Image (cartoon, rainbow, N blue to C red):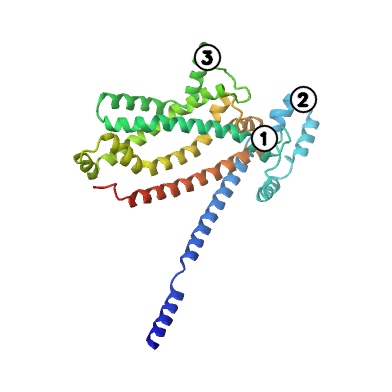
Amino acid sequence: MSEDKKRTKQSGLASLHRPNSSWRTGIKYGQSILQVIGVLWVVATLTFGLMQLTNDDVVDQVFSRQQSLSIEAQAEKRAELGLTAPIWLQYGRWLWGVLQGDFGQSMVTGEAVSSLLWSKLPATLLLMGAAVGVTLLIAVPTGLWTAHQKGRIGDKLVRSLTLFGNTMPNFFTALLLLYVVALKLNWLPVIARHNEPTALILPTITLVWSMSAKYIQQIRALALDELSKPYITGLRTSGLSWYMIYSRYILRAIAGPIVALVSLSCGSLLGGVTIVETIFMWDGVGKMAFDAITARDYPVLQAYVLWLAALYILLNWSADFWQTKLNRHYAKEPDHEI
């Protein structure tokens, strides 16, 4: 009995000296949060600094042109907007407001920046969701088909089209569609009216054209890598059809990388959608940012960049999490190898 007590005591002492996994997890997450805060601070500071390098401001770009203000009136307007204060004081006020969740007010409309951002966000999310959804519907079966047709005419034709799609910038595709489909053929409206469903078609096609090209190439490469593994030969020897192999094994194996690809592309899409929304007059966050740039509406633009950076970091975390989870789930499945 005394020996059992002695062992229990020794195990208790060993557990005290053993590193606590919860503490290590907490430290890890704490370091990640500090890194995110540091990145966001750098982004915010750089954005604010770059805004101060311009030779004009919102008074020159908006109020003077609309109201033909005199020099004295322009000076009064700048003082009213706080543009005459020292740069360090403007930065301090803005940063203190951000830390309190207040991104300020638009210098053009006077509306709260947070409210303006939230009012424009649904239109951008709708456009992004439509573009990503259609892209997956096109790219996943096409990428798997080209992998199966490797080296054949169909594969070479699709690869040529994807190369062409990658070389075409979104603004060129948008202008081409606008000229042919809307102006010449008059099939669809040129300008979106209150985000009508028909107005969603052309900007979606513009984004899908370039995204599909990248997705097809990535999915083809992932599928070819999986097809080269020995267990695929075993599956074919056992008499399993190609349809079952692709639907039951290949898709499961590449699900993690596809989720990561979607998450990362959504981050880049938020920045790239600006030109597309502006060309098609789609009233989303991207067009709001473009209007803020042309009007030198500093609070709106600074909030947009900061929000974009935070969302991109969140999407990166999400991509890592889901890719790791799906890969672990696939590795635990007993039937993915022969």
As drawn, the residue found furthest toward the left would be 237
Question: Which one is in front, 158 or 274?
Answer: 158
Give amino acid for label 1.
Asp
Picture quadrant of residue 67: top right
Residue indicated by mark 1 = 297
As drawn, the residue found furthest toward the top would be 184
Q: Nearer the viewer, mark 3 or mark 1?
A: 3
In 3D space, how far apart are the residues under numbered discs 3 and 1 (Cα atoms)?
Answer: 36 Å
Q: Earlier in the sequence, mark 3 or mark 1?
A: 3
Image position of 198 with respect to 89: above or below? above
Q: How many marks?
A: 3
Label 1 environment density (alpha carbons within 10 Å; few <14, some 14–19, many ≥20): many
Q: Earlier in the sequence, mark 2 or mark 1?
A: 2
In 3D space, how far apart are the residues under numbered discs 2 and 1 (Cα atoms)?
Answer: 17 Å
Is there a contact, CB below 8 Å, between mark 3 and mark 1? no
Residue 80, numbered circle: none
Image position of 62 with respect to 112: above or below? above
Q: Is residue 258 left or right of residue 250?
A: right
Query: The N terminus lies in which quarter of the figure?
Result: bottom left
Residue indicated by mark 3 = 187
